[in-house]
Image (cartoon, grey):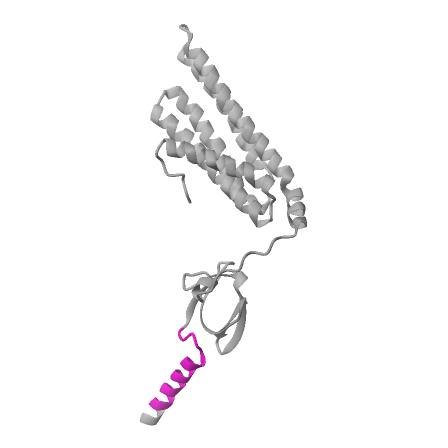
Amino acid sequence: MKVKKFIVFSAVLSGFFLSPFGFAESIVFKSGKTMEAQIIEKGDEYIKVDFLGLPITYYFENIESIDGKDPMSFFGLEKAAPKPLDPKVWQQWYEGVSSYIEKIKALDAEARNIDRQCLKDLTQAMDKKDVSPADKEKIVSQAGRELSAVIQQSESLEYPAQLLDFHKRMIDVQKYLKKHIEALLVKDGAYILDCTLSAAGSNMQAIKALRETYIKYGAPEEFLKPLDSKLESYKKIFEKYSLPALED
């Protein structure tokens, strides 16, 4: 019995010392898959793990984290500077998405114009002594219908998969503008401000999402500078009202 226990113990101990990393690590892949495995080898851009006695290679570019850290940090290494992309990568990608971007920008501009025109019409109506609540409701209802049509057009656009987050944020902006118009009728100052800032916050996040995707595909500075300028403007707005800049 003692010999048997010793053999089992020796086998476990031997297995432990075969790996310089020791115990099993929790590995999360960018695909969303997770696994518990013992790392038996580390290369410059990959690891090998012991999976049911078989060595399997995984590359860092496909790994989200190891025990909660990105692969380079887990091994105490510095991330290599990203390799500059071939300008053709950006050109080809942008040619494929530029039509969508122009369409969603045009719809965004239309939504803002509807919002501004509604505010102008309501202000002028309120300056008249004989204006009735029905007249105000008519202005708001008309603007609401026009904005609903814009939202519907935006939602029906075919968007590139890489711009899904940007697309959703842009539609959120339009929906908050619609709420802003409705708030004008009830004259609730706090709600009006909330809708305005929510629209600004969603637009800020849309710009961030677009900027991150642009960088991923190697956008030149001439495309990034206008986005940076808009982000800076939004930051000033939120600083003015002593509000956080709606970081995700």
Specify the segment rendered in magenta: 5-23
Residue 185 % position (x, y): 40, 20
Residue that extends furthest to the left in the rendered view of this protein: 2
Residue at 45% across, 31% down: 176
Q: Quadrant of the C terminus?
A: top left
Residue 45, located in which quarter of the rendered image?
A: bottom right
| Residue 171 pos. (x, y %) | 51, 35
- Which secondary structure is most common in the magenta stretch? helix
Q: Classify 140 as above or below 44.
A: above
Instruction: Report the front residue among 143 and 205.
Output: 205
Q: Is residue 160 above or below residue 149?
A: below
Is 103 on the left-hand or right-hand side of 53?
right
Q: Is residue 39 above or below residue 116?
A: below
Q: Quadrant of residue 91?
A: top right
Residue 168 shown in magenta:
no
Q: Residue at x 59, y 30 (%)?
A: 106
Residue 9 within the magenta-colored segment of the rendering: yes
Residue 94 position in % (x across, y down): 64, 43
Q: Is residue 20 visible?
A: yes
| Residue sitting nearer the eye, 73 or 110 | 73
Residue 1 appears in the figure: no
- Quadrant holding the N terminus: bottom left
Number of marks in the image?
Answer: 0
